[in-house]
Amino acid sequence: ESLSIFSYGLENLSKIDKVRFAQTLYGRKKDGLLYQESGVSLGQGSFMIPIEKEEIFKDLMRKWKLKYKSKRAFVNG
């Protein structure tokens, strides 16, 4: 399975914007964009998504003006 792994930092956001971003990404009850697009949280500041959904999350990072890195990986599972 081809996946993209994203890592990001929230240093440039205010406390309120950090909460808003988290709600957009994760949702309040795991109903956020990450879960809607079959992604998996890898811990604080990182997640993994199917490679075909990569542009959605790149756009999200650009919209919030976040510094991020993405890598592609192949996972057997």
Image (spheres, rainbow, N blue to C red):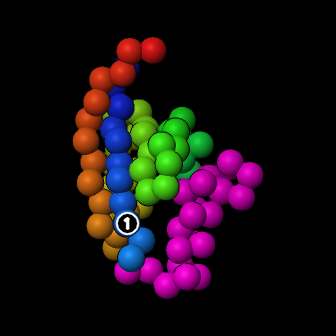
Q: Position of residue 18 (x, y in %)?
A: 53, 74
**Left or right: 14 with respect to 11?**
right
Asked if the magenta segment contains residue 25, the reply would be yes
Badge 1: residue crowd in 10 Å (few <14, some 14–19, many ≥20): some
Task: Please name the residue shown 41% across and 61% down the image.
Answer: 60
Q: Position of residue 57 (x, y in %)?
A: 40, 52
Residue closest to the eye, 43 or 70: 43
Q: Which stretch did the figure color magenta?
A: 12-32
Q: Position of residue 14 (x, y in %)?
A: 49, 84
The vertical placement of 18 against 40, above or below, is: below
Q: Secondary structure at mark 1?
A: strand
The vertical placement of 17 against 24, above or below, is: below
Q: How many marks?
A: 1
Task: Please name the residue shown 34% across and 69% down the image.
Answer: 66
| Quadrant location of the C terminus in the rendered image | top left
Residue closest to the eye, 11 or 32: 11
Task: Please name the residue shown 42% across and 71% down the image.
Answer: 10
**For residue 68, what is the image quadrant?**
bottom left
Residue closest to the eye, 55 or 23: 23
| Quadrant location of the N terminus in the rendered image | top left
Residue type marked 1:
Gly
Q: Which residue is mark 1?
A: 9
**Left or right: 28 with respect to 60?**
right
Asked if the magenta segment contains residue 24, the reply would be yes
Residue closest to the eye, 9 or 52: 9
The vertical placement of 61 against 14, above or below, is: above
**For residue 48, what is the image quadrant?**
top left
Q: Position of residue 15 (x, y in %)?
A: 55, 82
